[in-house]
Amino acid sequence: VRKLHVPEIAARVPTLLTDLYQFTMAYAYWRSGRHNEPAVFELFFRDNPFGGGFSLFSGMHDCLLFLRSFRFTDEDVEYLRSVLPPATDPAFFLFLRELDCSGVTLQSVPEGTVVFARVPLMEVSGPLAVVQLLETSLLCLVNYASLVCSNAARFRLAAGSRRKLLEMGLRRAQGPDGGLTASKYTYVGGFDMTSNVQAGFLFGIPVAGTMAHSYVTSFSSLEEVCGDPILPKTGDHDNIDLISLTKGWLGRVCELLGAEPGKIREGELAAFLSYAIAYPHNFLPVIDSYSVTCSGLLNFCAVALSLCELDYSPLGVRLDSGDLCSQSVEVRHVFRLCSEQFSIPAFQSLVIVGTNNISEYSMAELNKKENEIDVVGVGTHLVTCTRQPSLGCVYKLVEVRGSPRMKFSEDPEKSTVPGRKAVYRMLDTEGHPFLDLLCLCEEPAPKACVAVRCHPVVGNKTCQSITPAQVSCLRLDVYTKGQITHPLCSPAETREKVQSSIQTLHPRHKRLQKPDSYVVSFKVHLLLWRRGTTSGD
């Protein structure tokens, strides 16, 4: 197994990649002697993305590496000295230079887990100044990773399990790091391949891709086909004149299909031949540069039949415009005709790739129409998350010096739940999760087959009694006093966890349209305690 070349997190997310007010608050804490007070923050989001019923928690791997490498360099400190107010005490910069995360503890939901709005995904505890400084960076690492991973999972649900999915959004992504993050976490979310070569190198993701329309349109005649003559794969014969062989096959294909040779683009044929000579084992051209039925499909069949005669196996075609469904049906029909007429079994298994500004909606529509598309390539709507640009994760203080802290707000939806909490997932008799329960940390854990009284976090619903068939604790200790305490998983391993976690969901919760709301509740003791809490921050 190839060793993954994971980029240094300090290069991708340096310690200064944060908001200025984190430093001004840290300084104020330090000046008042509060910087080492034990504090606890929680990271969560308020609404499930894309109008859906769930999200996927991602980015924990990078958060752990960030915590482990968190340190300010001399250069960092000198820059901070230049941007903070001149009255800042010079001793504060000495404090920053010695700062690290050796006093920080992180509890987290496992990466790749299905999660829901209002559930604390991470609990970050440690010295007040340090855990305050971590806020922006942790949010940056979790927000987009979780959002794009969730988007990928929705595309996978829309596509079904049969089709392969190719992520190809690098050119439309929000910058290089956005492109790499998208490639990594769309793979984790259920895509099979990426066009991003750097992501393949760094994360071990399978890469795929062939040619663009520019390659096809750069050719104008067969005189431009050059290079070493192609040899039969078996090596039993002399060099073959591939152009003459292909012309012969093209005539037979036109006769079979009743096509007009005068409408065939010679430059396109030259492009296909040139590419086949370069990659006889990986021939998969785009066939809609001019006309699929009048030129591209005919030229492909002629070159592919020539390759088959030489004992090579062409891969298939890509469609990138027009009605992909109807075109794919016509293309498959022609492949089958050629297979039967010319006794070429390989034509029965040729792949049809569809790419054309695919959205979640158009992906779902593929399942409603007759089509023969085997692989779907998705770019813009996947990596830019056009339906929702941000997950909206927040990082809120819930405890200082062992005392609960609560944010009150003019908007009740933005009020927070004070105190350290344990999080449990309630499962029914079929193993489907049906409720996540927030409890005080010191409370006994709920037990299977024992009734629990609880109240929904959102809404005015009354208390209810629920009896889970199974109970699982959602959070793990992943970082303790400067050490990563939970094994780091590769993207492929996390991808498997994602699929397993999604499989546990009841179909009503993973519907793409109008899913049932998943319930997140307080245990009644926590609700009463919250109502009695008056401390604010």
Image: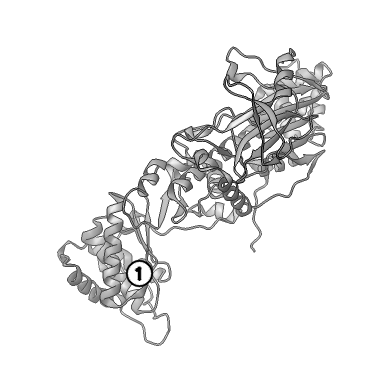
Q: Position of residue 221 (x, y in %)?
A: 25, 65
Quarter the N terminus occupies: bottom right
Query: Which residue is at 74% across, 19% downward?
Result: 529
Looking at the picture, tell me which residue is in the foreground, 68 or 48.
48
Q: Quadrant of residue 394?
A: top right
Looking at the picture, tell me which residue is in the foreground, 175 or 535.
535
Q: Which residue type does callout 1 highlight? A: Gln
Q: Position of residue 519 (x, y in %)?
A: 59, 31
Q: How is the image coloured?
A: one colour
Q: Quadrant of residue 126?
A: top right
Query: Which residue is at 39% across, 45% downward?
Result: 364
| Left or right: 110 as drawn, with respect to 165 | right
Would residue 14 be visible to someone looking at this image?
no
Would residue 284 be visible to someone looking at this image?
yes
| Left or right: 89 as drawn, with respect to 55 | right
Q: Position of residue 14 (x, y in %)?
A: 67, 37
Quarter the C terminus occupies: top right
Query: Which residue is at 64% across, 54% downward?
Result: 5
Q: Which residue is mark 1?
A: 348
Q: Position of residue 406 (x, y in %)?
A: 70, 18
From what the image shows, is residue 297 above or below residue 243? above
Q: How many marks?
A: 1
From what the image shows, is residue 432 above or below residue 398? below
From what the image shows, is residue 439 above or below residue 483? above
